[in-house]
Amino acid sequence: RPRTIDELKDAIRRAVAELNEDEEVRVRVFGEFRRRLDECVRRGGQSVERR
């Protein structure tokens, strides 16, 4: 678990790099992200629980 901003940035960069290696996973992840954004907008900005 990242303890500093720099560690968090590095963790995000590694996660994005992994996504770029697997198109199927990338499509699923971004599809879910889009679904959650749409739900957030539908709820007027309220948070959305993960499934």
Image (tube, rainbow, N blue to C red):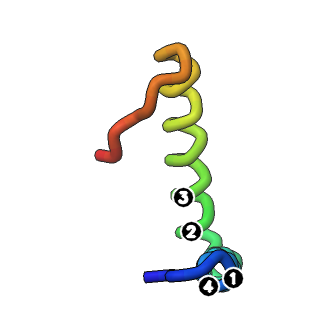
Position above or below: 15 against 40: below
**C-beta proximity under 8 Å, tags 3 and 1:** no
Tag on residue 32?
none
45 with respect to 5 (left or right)? left
Secondary structure beneath label 3: helix
Position above or below: 35 against 20: above
Q: CA distance from mark 2 to mark 3?
A: 9 Å
Query: Residue 35: x and y, percent?
Result: 52, 36
User: What residue appears at the point 57 percent right and 34 percent down from the top-left corner?
Assistant: 37
Disc 3 marks a residue whose amino acid type is: Val
Disc 1 marks a residue whose amino acid type is: Asp
Disc 4 marks a residue whose amino acid type is: Glu
Query: Residue 39: x and y, percent?
Result: 49, 26
Label 2 crowd (10 A; few <14 / some 14-19 / many >=20): few
Q: Nearer the viewer, residue 3 or 25?
A: 3
Q: CA distance from mark 4 to mark 3?
A: 22 Å
**C-beta proximity under 8 Å, tags 4 and 2:** no
Residue of label 2: 24
**C-beta proximity under 8 Å, tags 1 and 4:** yes
Q: CA distance from mark 1 to mark 4?
A: 4 Å
Classify the position of the N terminus by image quarter: bottom left
Position above or below: 2 against 39: below
